[in-house]
Image (tube, helix red, strand yellow):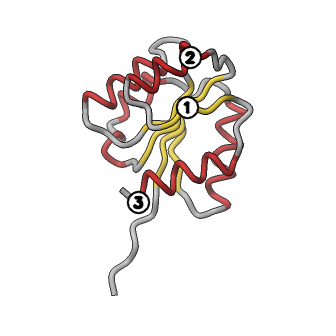
Amino acid sequence: MQATKQTTIAIIDDDCALLEALRDLFETVGISSLVYSSADDFLNSGDLSRVDCVLADVRMPGTSGLALLDAVVRAEGPPVCMMSSFAESTIRQHALSAGAALFLAKPLNSRDLLEFVAQSTSR
């Protein structure tokens, strides 16, 4: 009998409390998460090939979430969900046209997050 692969999501946000809350949410439903406090930390980790999908904040110190999205798309990486407290239509449209699979406004809805992960891993 073959073991099923555990889903792993990368969560990138400079808000440590949000990182912890999201890690707890995903852990509760059996989804492994790798957390990073900056886009640079994630991009330098070498973990891009280890994750099934990415959840990233738009605005962070250093490399922005939109620049992270560009890097993941260029690398033909996994689906990316962008999130932001600043959900202006121009930012949302830019993220989606740059290749984001989804854009969510904060505060996040856990059902939307879990649906994104489920759709990302069923491809």
Q: How many marks do you count on the picture? A: 3
The tag on residue 32 is none
From the image, which quarter does the C terminus lie in? bottom left
Residue under the point 46% across and 39% down = 54
Q: In this view, does 49 lie to the left or right of 61?
A: left
Q: Which of marks 2 and 1 is in front?
A: 1
Q: Is residue 114 above or below residue 46?
A: below
Determine which residue is flagged by label 3. 122
Q: Where is residue 49 in the image (x, y as percent from the top left)?
A: 30, 45
- Residue 84 figure quarter: top right
Q: Nearer the viewer, residue 62 or 72?
A: 72
Residue neighbourhood size for the residue with mark 1, other residues' Cα within 10 Å, grouped as few (<14), some (14–19), many (≥20): many
- Residue 45 figure quarter: top left
Query: Going from the N terminus, do you reach mark 3 or mark 1 first?
Result: 1
Q: Is residue 20 left or right of residue 48?
A: right
Task: Label 1, secondary structure: give it.
Answer: strand
Three-letter residue code for mark 2: Met
Determine which residue is flagged by label 2. 60
Q: Is residue 11 above or below residue 2?
A: above
Residue under the point 56% across and 16% down = 60
Q: Position of residue 16 (x, y in %)?
A: 67, 30
Query: Going from the N terminus, do you reach mark 3 or mark 2 first?
Result: 2
User: Is there CB contact under 8 Å for labels 3 and 2?
Assistant: no
* Residue that extends furthest to the bottom in the rendered view of this protein: 1
